[in-house]
Amino acid sequence: MKVLTRWLRHYLPALTVTDRQLADDLTLRGIAVEGVHPLGEGNGHLFEMDITTNRVDAMNHYGIAREAATIYNLPLEPLHPRLPIGTLVDEPFSVRIDPSAKGLCGRFTAQVLRNVSIAPSTGQVAEFFTLLGQKQISNAVDASNFVLLGMGHPTHAFDLDKIEGAIVVRLAHKGEKLRLLDGTERTLEPDDLVVADEKKALALAGVMGGWDSMITPETKNILVEAAWFDPATVRRSSRRHLLHTDASHRFERGADFNAAPLANALVSQLILQAGGSIEGELVDIVDPEIAQCTASRAPIELSVAQVQRHLGTTLDPQGITSEIVSRFLTSLGCELVLHGIDLYQVKLPSWRLDLEREIDLVEEIARVYGYNRFANTLPTALPVTDSPWATAQIAVRRRLLELGFSEAVSSTFASRQDADLFYGNAAGKCRTVEMENPLSEEASLLRPSLVPGMATMLAHNLNRDVREARLFEQGEVFTGTSAPDAGFITEVHEAPQLSLGITTAAAPESRLYPAADAPIFELKGAIESLVSIFAPPGGQQALTFTTTGTPAWLEPGRSAVALLDNQPLASFGELVASERDKRKLRQPVYLAQLDLRLLYDLPLRRATSHDLSRYQAVERDFSFVLPDSVQFHTIAASIDALAIPELQSRRPVEIWRDAKKHPGVYSLLLRTVFQSHDRTLRDEEMTTWSTRIIEAITAAGGTLRG
């Protein structure tokens, strides 16, 4: 925006600082002056300014002058147009708001001027426009533009003799044509707001006037209009027709509802300087509902103590804080009523739509005072406390990265459909936390599970032909608790959760399980590895697995539940086929969900080391036939219960099944490794230990193969 310093000084005759000092002071108070250009002796400077979109009140010379008056504590010249008394008429000019435009035109003012003289602009208008580089058209059109640049409210001048009947503000008819001042013809839509007469549209409301009613050198009678149009409606028409004008720029951001009569009078005064007269009184049509909304803006309570607390300063070495607050806000147009010692009731000016809360007023006080005047002090450091789970979270993340997983982050929100599948109806009174104003149905509640987000991320990778992915996510999940007989959530609970996801196009072959089951066992191994980094206070925790009680989102027969000391720790397996089809996944997806609270309640296992043995290790393999009901963790527990110090490891090497010849059983090749740190093992010891292992597995239901 271009601003003339001569124009500013017209509103601030007591301003004595230099133009460059003024530019610096405005910039330091948030009214950015990006360029200062001298205009020659006696003409001051031209400011190139960048006004933020929320400060529509400062998008004009008078608004900038108001800011300068506040900074320097100077009086601001009031805008008082002096108009002659209008001639009496039997019937005032007729203006009406069509029911279709209810709520879209809050105020419409109209003033009839008779016997005007259309000529080039002279005097101050011509001088200021020349310095600004503003195109001059005629005194009537220039008057409207001058008021827009001067006090910020858009107006328009119609050739009264080209208006047929009354002025009607209405919505356009579908397919209605309107030729605008730029010479282009526009086809209007039913939600375009227009200013029309009884037969045709005259202007696209808030955007641009029409060709058929424009001012020409032959114009003798003028209708001056100043109105308030709905910002969203103006914005929609402006975007649709690709018309960004000075008027639409201001209406879109919220014009001053109370400024229309003043703007109309200022334009009329300028036009009448070349001759003519006023006919009748100003027609002022007001939508009572919008006027009530504007008038009923609640005053804001402002405590001087709160100002000091937020800003960390008393603003003045003498501590005259109450007077400073009062002076700053009064200069900005606020009306203050003091209640008690330091509590103000602040009534906001109609042109400051950006002020809504106490903190907005605190910001205004700091801005006007000058950010550069605050002392450079370092903030007081508060003690930093980590989350009680921070160390455990880092350990889990490190272990999963070591296992080849990549960390991912999903949305905190979930859909009702996903919550019902992946969380279900929890026992007791826990339930999902719904958003009061959700952005969409897909984000209508806080996530009760990380699994839907993991499934979505794997689908995202597959859709981009990334067929090998191993992802994990640590995050909070949310559930709510309601009070007895309450129909709403009274408390929201957060809990740490971990989700794992695997999708692969070619699983590795194994002697322990079919290739198709490899991702399931990889998830199982990841769970076992995570548990191993924690150390229970009472000794080794019991991690067991069962295929019963798996959730509905996992495929039956291809999923399992991990139990830590008989408490559900994790569910893992293949995503159920119906959900895979719904998400259009091109290959199987394997998921795991872990309740990290069970692990985070345990201390981390300390890293230990021991010397390597100098003595040779001895391997012994055993081949057993076992019922399908006997799982390997049962075998491992039976062997561990023997407490053989020299037993270094026991692991399955191969599992073989033949459902036709030997239904209900499987063959297990078990490999054990024995080693001592102080001697060479003897055959007699190996025989004894082997016998004990065979007896333990036989007791568990196994049979040694001959």
Image (tube, rainbow, N blue to C red):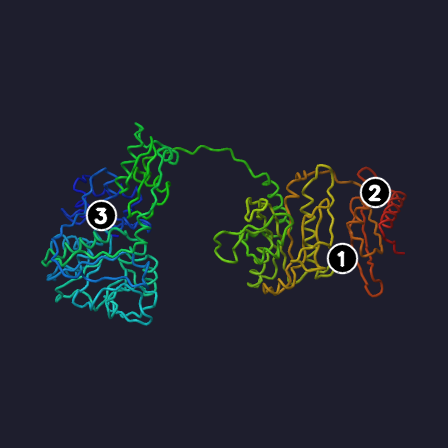
> What residue lies at 32% left-to-right and 48% top-to-bottom?
353
Q: Which residue is mark 2?
A: 642
| Place of residue 575 in the rendered image (x, y in percent of width and height, measured from the top left) | 65, 59
* Relative height, residue 37 to residue 346 (above, below): below
Residue 392: name its quadrant: top right
Vertical position of residue 247 compared to residue 165: above or below: above
Q: Residue 68's x, y, as percent?
A: 24, 42
Image quadrant occupied by the C terminus: bottom right
SS label for mark 3: helix
Label 1 crowd bin: few (<14), some (14–19), many (20+), radius 10 Å: some
Whether residues under marks 3 and 1 lie with C-beta atoms below 8 angstroms apart, the answer is no
**Number of other residues with Cα within 10 Å of mark 2, as a class: few under 14, some 14 to 19, many 20 or more:** few
Kind of residue indicated by mark 3: Tyr
Query: Which of the two labelled residues, at mark 1 and mark 2, occupies the earlier sequence position?
Result: 1
- Please name whichever residue, 316 or 221, is drawn nearer the observer in this view of the structure: 221
Query: How many angstroms separate mark 3 from mark 1 (CA)?
Result: 83 Å
Q: Quarter-wise, where is residue 229 in the image?
A: bottom left
Spatial separation of the CA atoms under disc 1 and disc 2: 25 Å
How far separated are the C-alphas under marks 2 and 3? 93 Å
User: Residue tagged by mark 1?
Assistant: 512
Q: Position of residue 510 (x, y in %)?
A: 74, 59
Q: Earlier in the sequence, mark 3 or mark 1?
A: 3
**Is label 2 in a helix, a strand or a loop?**
loop
- Residue at the farthest front position: 90
**Residue drawn at 60 percent across, 46 percent down:** 496
Residue lying farthest top?
Answer: 318
Disc 1 residue type (three-letter): Leu
Which residue position is annotated with label 3? 62
